[in-house]
């Protein structure tokens, strides 16, 4: 285990409210990723970070923002949650940005937007 | 069409059976990963392949780069192997360790 935790693990919220998910790692990995997992789709990359304050968009970034002020924390914010953002969110980390690098996953956060 | 296709989507087997899960991809890749997602949701990496074959215990993963195809085999399957198995590729055109994932294969092994 790469010591990755996510909080909260479950959340129910209403449409239009802001939501922040936290990913915390204790492995000092430089790279961190946020994915969402939905039926009929594989894991899809939302945003990723390649260092403190360095982030970039993934394939499904609309409606999401991220921040990374410390190596160990990567926050995902839904500024105004919509029902289409109901999903399971996974954080992952990797030590290096190389072809052969393994990603380590957090336990996931189940988000329901009503 | 997804860049990564897995088959079958669902697979039910009896304990002891030999299991094969397939992954096909349509673009050039630098590496292919097999991951396992437990019923509780946790995801762990099983293998990373760029060529040939790898074996770990009862699990064997193979890749044929020319045919753009990989297989994950489980020998002497056991109910604890029940999980979703996910194929993911590192596209040659993308930088770094970002992965593109298949939808997964739900495996159920009955006692």
Image (tube, rainbow, N blue to C red):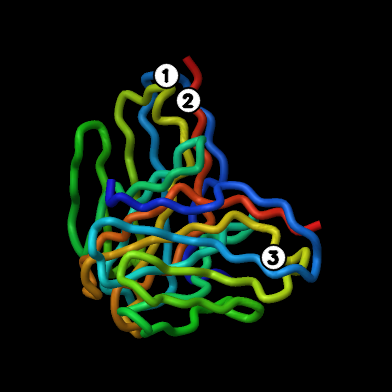
Q: Position of residue B11 (x, y in %)?
A: 53, 36
- Residue at mark 1 to residue at mark 3: CA–CA distance: 38 Å
Residue on which the image places disc 3:
A85
Please state the horizontal and vertical placement of residue A57, each as a whole percent of the image. Answer: 49, 83
The quadrant holding residue A102 is bottom left
Asked if badge 1 and badge 2 are on a common chain, one would say yes
* Residue B76 position by quadrant: top left
Percent coordinates x, y for residue B13 in the rendering:
48, 26
Which residue corresponds to mark 2?
B109
Q: In this rendering, is residue B61 above or below A24?
A: above
Return the disc, 1 or 2, that comes first in the chain's sequence: 1
Q: According to the image, label 1 marks what residue?
A: B15
> Mark 2 to mark 3: distance in Å?
32 Å
Q: Element under label 1?
A: loop
Q: Residue at x 48, y 76 (%)?
A: A47
For the residues labelled 1 and 2, the Cα–Cα distance comes to 6 Å
- Residue found 59% across the figure and 61% down from its top: A41
Residue at the location (24% across, 58% down)?
A: A27
């Amino acid at each position: 285990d790469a010591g990755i935790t996510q909080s909260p693990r479950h959340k129910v919220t209403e449409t239009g409210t802001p939501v922040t998910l936290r990913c915390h790692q204790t492995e000092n990995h430089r790279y961190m990723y946020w994915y969402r997992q939905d039926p009929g789709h594989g894991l899809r990359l939302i945003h990723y970070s390649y260092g403190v304050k360095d982030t970039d968009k993934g394939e499904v970034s609309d409606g999401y923002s991220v921040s990374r002020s410390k190596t160990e924390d990567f926050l995902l914010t839904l500024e105004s949650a919509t029902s289409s953002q109901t999903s399971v969110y996974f954080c992952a980390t990797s030590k290096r940005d190389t072809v052969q690098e393994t990603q380590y996953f957090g336990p996931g956060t189940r988000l329901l937007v009503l | 069409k997804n860049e990564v296709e897995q088959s079958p989507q669902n697979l039910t087997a009896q304990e002891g059976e030999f299991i094969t899960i397939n992954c096909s991809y349509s673009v050039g890749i630098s590496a292919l990963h097999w991951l396992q997602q437990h019923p509780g949701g946790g995801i762990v990496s099983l293998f990373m392949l760029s060529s040939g074959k790898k074996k770990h215990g009862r699990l064997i993963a193979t890749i044929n780069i020319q045919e753009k195809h990989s297989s994950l085999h489980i020998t002497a399957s056991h109910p604890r192997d029940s999980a979703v198995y996910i194929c993911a590729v590192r596209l040659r055109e993308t930088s770094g360790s970002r992965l593109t994932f298949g939808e997964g294969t739900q495996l159920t092994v009955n006692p």
